[in-house]
Amino acid sequence: MPQYVVAQYGDRRRYLVKALREIGHRITRLASRMDDDDLGRVAPGEEWSVTEIVGYLRDSEREDLAALEAMLRVDGSKIADRRAIRHVDDGAYRKADPADLLWDFATLRDETVWLLESAGTAWNHVGIHPYRGEVPVLEFVAEMNERDLDAMWRIQRAHDALRPPGREQVTGLAEP
């Protein structure tokens, strides 16, 4: 049986940045393969439409990028509580253009990846959260990755449920 070595911090950092990049691309590809009607529908067994998921991801990415910029610039920076989920509950994304949401998310994700790739020793910094106290950059980025994985699987399930095999692809979004 092969022996597995737990990734050390340097490897974990590279893994997380790679995961953020690749999962962001996967989310973009999945959503761009769906037509606007399907993007706005809630798939059976799901709580949110794909448009709402992408809107949530966009706003989460905006909040997380601001927090990361602060933490990487100054160790011990105050960071805000994550609030993007509240926009889904208030219906803010239902009328939004899915293509705009997806473009904004992809652009913000590219900025986040670039910021993390150039962070150097600032990966050792922490942010000060109002309820959680010190939050290390590595932990913060790992939480982003977990959120992305959950969103990706939700979008994949919606894609599969709303676009059964044999249905022709019609999309209002450009393929990246």
Image (cartoon, rainbow, N blue to C red):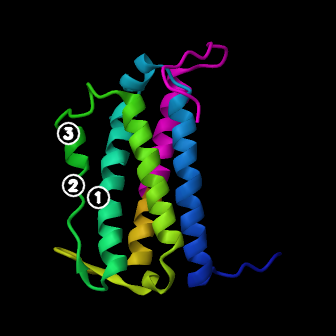
Q: Position of residue 142 (x, y in %)?
A: 45, 68
- Give the CA distance from mark 2 to mark 1: 8 Å
Nearest to N terminus: mark 2 or mark 3:
2
Q: Which residues are magenta?
A: 147-176
**How would you rate the neighbour count of disc 1 (Cα within 10 Å): few for under 14, some for 14-19, many for 20 or more?**
some
Q: Is residue 45 visible?
A: no
| Res 3 → quadrant | bottom right
- Name above or below for residue 91 compared with residue 27: above
Residue 63: mark in rendering: 1
Disc 2 and disc 1 in contact, CB within 8 angstroms: yes
Q: Residues within 10 Å of mark 3 (few under 14, many from 20)?
A: few
Tag 1's secondary structure? helix
Q: Which mark is residue 89?
A: 3
Q: Quadrant of residue 117?
A: bottom right
Dot 2 falls on a residue whose secondary structure is loop
In this view, the residue in front, 132 or 61, is: 61
Distance (Cα) linking label 1 and label 3: 17 Å
